[in-house]
Amino acid sequence: GIRDISVWLEFRRVLFRSDTTFQTTAYPGTPVTSVTSNNYTANVNDYYIGINSSSPSTVNLPSANNGKLLIVKDESGHASINPITIQGNIDNDTSAILQIDNAALTLIYSNGWRIIWHICLTVILMLLMK
């Protein structure tokens, strides 16, 4: 079966737990933001931020109420060569770097931003094929 796996990526800690089920239901009108520039400041109304930039990008996180969810996704499929820096108080650090093609981070605000889910299809497929 699939087992717990801790994956350390680049300089930032991102935990992937294969035994965790995370379910989100998107409703009509769920805010979807497409970003093609290299700098975006998120606001409290954002829910999903899709980055499709041809250069390294930065997403600046806002302060929010506890419980606020935010997803940042590499839509370009080129985060390995154009990393996405997510800036804000994230797990008691100043930033996180998304540097895996097509990956996404889901964050929740709880007295600062917390990474609660990281998914990368390539990593999942590699684990399933072992």
Image (cartoon, rainbow, N blue to C red):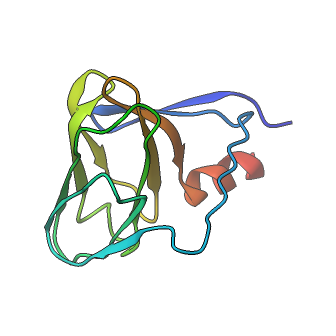
In the image, residue 106 lies at what x, y percent? Answer: 47, 46
Identify the image quadrant of residue 57.
bottom left
Q: In this image, 120 relative to 33: left or right?
A: right
Query: Is residue 5 rendered to the left or right of residue 53?
Result: right
Above-or-below relation of 101 to 119: below
Residue 82: horizontal and vertical position, in percent?
A: 23, 65
Residue 19, image x, y percentages:
75, 33
Left or right for 12, reference 37:
right
**Furthest residue toward right:** 1
Quarter of the image for the C terminus: give it.
top right
Q: Is residue 1 above or below residue 122?
A: above
| Number of numbered discs visible in the structure rendering | 0
Which quadrant of the figure has residue 80?
bottom left
Q: Residue at x 23, y 25 (%)?
A: 93
Query: Residue at 36% of width from left, 75% of height from top?
Result: 76
At horizontal 58% and vertical 50% (from top left) the residue drawn is: 123
**x, y (%) of residue 97?**
27, 45
Residue drawn where x is 27% and y is 21% of the image: 92
For residue 107, side relative to residue 27 (left or right): left
Q: Quadrant location of the N terminus?
A: top right
Instruction: Between residue 114 and residue 2, name the one nearer to us.
Output: 114
The residue lying toward the viewer, choosing from 44 and 23, is: 44
Looking at this rendering, what residue extends furthest in the left direction? 39
